[in-house]
Image (cartoon, rainbow, N blue to C red):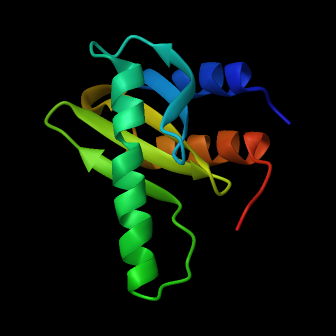
Amino acid sequence: MATIKDSLEEALSIDGSVGAALVDFESGMCLGNAGQPGFDLELAAAGNTEVVRAKKNIRDRLGLTDRIEDILITLDSQYHLIRMVGTTMFFYLVLQRDKSNLALARKQLSTIEKALEIERT
């Protein structure tokens, strides 16, 4: 199993990646981060706990039982990719749109997630 530091370094090596964080969405605590996206990565990562909580809440209220794999937020110049890890954490990856391949980034982040993952539902 990969360490948090190794996982974040690998996420940062994805083409177009400028920032990566691992977040515990139950507490909102950033467990680690890497990169320089041009904004407070720790604040953004912790703030995205609300996005994850809202999506999980709606999924549950709809009676859906599928696991959330990822959530994508598209900005003019960036992709913000949230990838679930187990039942309590998520990767937050910031990609420059003009330098990244979203499909490839999702695949690579999935591989990193599986190497780090401890518990899956």
Above or below for 55 versus 84: below
User: Residue 32 appears at what percent x and percent y?
Assistant: 59, 22
Q: Residue furthest left?
A: 76
Q: Residue furthest bottom?
A: 63
**Residue that appears at 62% across and 51% down:** 88
Above or below for 33 versus 11: above
User: Residue 38 appears at what percent x and percent y?
Assistant: 27, 12
**Residue that appears at 30% across and 38% down:** 79
Instruction: Give 27 or 47, whichever is nearer the viewer.
Output: 27
**Residue that appears at 44% across and 46% down:** 82
**Residue that appears at 58% across and 41% down:** 109
Determine whether, in the image, residue 87 is placed left or right of residue 95: right
Residue 19 visible: yes
Q: Quadrant of residue 74?
A: top left
Instruction: Give 71 or 23, whichever is nearer the viewer.
Output: 23
Q: Residue furthest right?
A: 1
Q: Quadrant of the C terminus?
A: bottom right
Q: Quadrant of the N terminus?
A: top right
Total marks placed: 0
User: Residue 114 appears at what percent x and percent y?
Assistant: 73, 48
Determine whether, in the image, residue 34 is placed left or right of residue 43: right
Residue 13 visible: no
Above or below for 91 versus 110: above
User: Residue 34 appears at what percent x and percent y?
Assistant: 52, 15
